[in-house]
Amino acid sequence: MAFSGFSRDTLYTPVPNPLFGPLLEEIDDLAELKVTLRGIWLCHRQRGSPRMTPLAEFVNDRALLRGLGGPGRDAVPEIRRGLRLAVERGVFLRYAPESPDGGEYYLLNTLHDRRALDRLRGQEAPGPGTDHALSLDMQPDPARKPNIFALYEETIGMLSPMLAEELKDAEDNYSAEWVSEAFAIAAAENKRNWRYVSGILRRWASEGRGTGRNDGKPGRHPAEDQRRKHLEAYQRRRARDRTAR
């Protein structure tokens, strides 16, 4: 069946440029290629820092199971093999906390995630009775909200590579609740651009959330204060007019 093409509502996932160059030249294993492509998508869906995708998400992913399975062929060993090859090539990082229930996680091999993973590993102190479980903010959330890339694509449109790092910084600096609400306000106000959304976040960070002004426009005072100032000025003018008569 022929692919019908990309619709105007199609979402996009940032992909590192080397995947279209030297990595594409070197990868000659179908399982590795499919796991790499799907893994990038899975990693971008994660919350927290660093973004870690549990092994369970790979081996239960419908696209990978269908794409690497077939009549009489179990896809799970192929998925695991593709992951192993991607780790050996350096596309993904593998993290297995030193605890019986620590699980197994995979990350994109980026500078940001390498540093975060080093810090996470440094927190693990060997010894009996030590809890090596992931800290709460780093545990994948089964009921996670869409990450900032998904919110951008759903609210504004196609994501440009130039904005990817700025969006990632914003996601690291602001809570998921703030980010989600800022995009919702931009959509409600029909101001569907990142400058407006980031303006909301910066205002909340500097003035506090719930100060009365929740837009991305410049200015120091909440909207309610501005309305009160105009009303008081109007009342003063009316009082002066009555006195003059």
Image (spheres, rainbow, N blue to C red):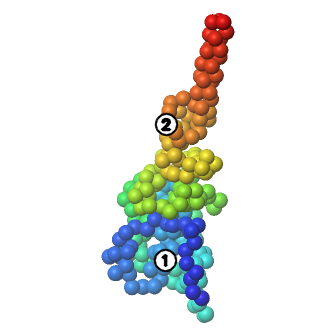
> Is there any visible trace of residue 194 in the rendered image?
yes
98 above or below 25? above
What residue would you read off at disc 1?
A: 35
Q: Quadrant of the N terminus?
A: bottom right
Amino acid type, mark 1 = Val
- Front of the two marks 2 and 1: 2
Q: Nearer the viewer, residue 154 or 129?
A: 154
Classify residue 238 as left or right of residue 175. Answer: right
Image position, residue 31 (x, y; %)? 47, 83
From what the image shows, is residue 86 above or below residue 196? below
Q: Is residue 18 depicted above or below 152 in this figure?
A: below
Residue 162 image offset from top left, x and y in percent = 40, 58
In percent of the image, x 58 and y 56: which residue is there?
Answer: 155
Going by the picture, which residue comes out furthest to the left? 22
**4 or 92, nearer to the observer:** 4
Number of numbered discs: 2
- Crowding near pointer 2: few (<14 within 10 Å), some, many (20+)? few
The residue under the point 61% across, 57% down is 145
127 with respect to 150 (left or right): left
Examine the rendering and report whether any part of residue 99 can be seen.
no
16 or 130: nearer the eye? 16
In front: 210, or 155? 155
Q: Which mark is residue 74?
A: none
Measure the C-alpha gap from mark 2 to mark 1: 45 Å
The residue identified by callout 2 is: 218
Question: x and y percent of residue 147 in the render?
Answer: 55, 57
